[in-house]
Structure formats: structure tokens, C-alpha cells
Amino acid sequence: MNVSARAAVVSGGSSGIGKAIVARLHADGWIVYTCGRDRAKLAALEAELPGVRTHVCDVGSRAAVLAFAQAVFAEVPTLQLLVSNAGGSREIDFTREDLSSLDVTAELRNNTEGAINLITEFLPGLRHNDGGAILVVSSGYALAPATRAPVYCASKAALHSLCKSLRLQLAPLRITVTELLPPVVDTPSVAHRKVAKLAPGPVADAAVRGVLAGSEEVRPGKVRCLPFLLRLMPRTSERIVART
């Protein structure tokens, strides 16, 4: 990976894992562009980390991502790192009788389509650099789903499959694809949950180290052992994860 110029794009960088990744890259001297939907949070991020460039963008909108990419490429022609992090999670209970009032596919648009939109529009910058890296923030639930959030888990499972395919397709272009599969991380979306959580900072540090090393997957915390357990005792492991 060529890190001489070191320009990075991070989606969803105003809070949680995304903000921690932005902070880590900024501290390491990267030129960082990030986006989010909350203008006030982005302004606060710029004040906290001077030099970070922010843009208001909903990654679920292809047109919005295209406008974001055009703004970035107007300043830097090449890109060394793309981090697809933006997304969201909800706990949807399909046993409810009023599902027709819910937007039940929001996670598919924000998590899955958002990543695809981002990769599609920023890939030219990586190609122009003659190589680089993509980091996709997925989840340990991509490997085994939780009962409480079926659509969210499905969106992350789709990202897991996407990473595998892209890793093979983009290898001839010298573009690596790293998937981050964390357990529950202490972010605003899970503030209501009373379970063990990892801090965003160490997760971001592990992710950046993994990207720079060209790792295919980064599995912090308990997720480190999950693939082995799913092979050793698949049904038991899935039942345990389903309850988390």
C-alpha cells in the first residue's frame, strides 16, 4: 500500500467507530475526508480535529455520494484508503402486527447499498493511485445473526459476501479489501443495551493496523474465536449469538 500522500475517505465519521478511525488517521498525518448526515456533529468534529474535511452526505443516496466524491476529487486526485463505515441498526420484531408502518429495509439501504455506493464512486481514486485499500466496517453478526435485529444482521452478512467477492476482483488492481467484524462496540446506537462493549478507540486502532498489514479480516474481542466455534459447534454457537 502506497502511503506517501495518504489521503483517506471515511463515511460516518462523526461518531462511534467512524469517528475513532478518523481520529486515528488524523493523528497519523493522513488527509482525512469524512461525511455524515448531521451537520452539527460534523462541525463539532472539524473543531475537535482541525484539518479534517467534512461533507454532509447520506450514503444511501447514490447522487449524494457522487457529489461527495466529486468534492473530494476536486482537491485530491488520488486516494490511498476508503473506509465504508456509515450505517445504522434497529431492533425490529417481525412478530409485531404493525410492521406496515415501519421502514423495514432502511438498514439494507444505509448499510449495504451505502457501502456499494461509496465503493463505486471512490474506486476511481484508488485506481488512479495504482492501488490502495478498502476497509468495510461489518459486524460479528455477519457470521451469526442476533434474533433482536434480523435486518441489520442480514445487511452485514451481505457486506461479508461483498468483501469476499471484491477482494478477488480488485486484487489485480492491487487494491486490498479488509473487513472489520467487531462485537458490540460502545456507540450511540447501542447505548440502551446493558451488555459488555468494546471501546471504539481500540477497535479503530486494530482496524487501521489490519488495513496497513493487508489483512483480509479484523475480528476484535470475542469475534476472534467465532469462526472456529462455528466450525466446532455451529448450532450451539449460533444459539448463543442469537441471544446477544
Image (cartoon, rainbow, N blue to C red):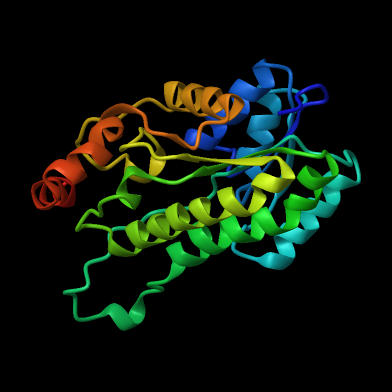
Q: Say if 52 sits above or below 147 in the image.
A: above
Residue found at x 62% / y 29% = 22
- Which residue corresponds to the image point at 81% horizontal and 21% vertical from the top-left? 4
Is 126 above or below relative to 198?
A: below
| Residue at (74% x, 51% y) in the render | 122
Position of residue 109 relative to residue 186, above or below, is: below
Q: Position of residue 198 (x, y in %)?
A: 33, 27
The residue at the far top in this view is: 28
Residue 76, image x and y in percent? 88, 38
| Left or right placement of residue 229 versus residue 110 in this view | left
Q: Of residues 75 and 171, which is closer to you in this image?
A: 171
Q: Position of residue 104 (x, y in %)?
A: 37, 72
Q: Residue at x 65, y 66 (%)?
A: 61
Residue sticking out furthest to the left: 236
Tell me: 37 left or right of 79.
left
- In the rendered image, which quarter contains the C terminus? top left
Q: Where is residue 109? Give x, y as percent.
A: 51, 66
Left or right, 211 with reference to 219: right
Quadrant of the image containing the N terminus: top right
Q: Quick one: 172 or 59, which is closer to the camera?
A: 172
Tell me the quarter of the picture where residue 47 sits. top right
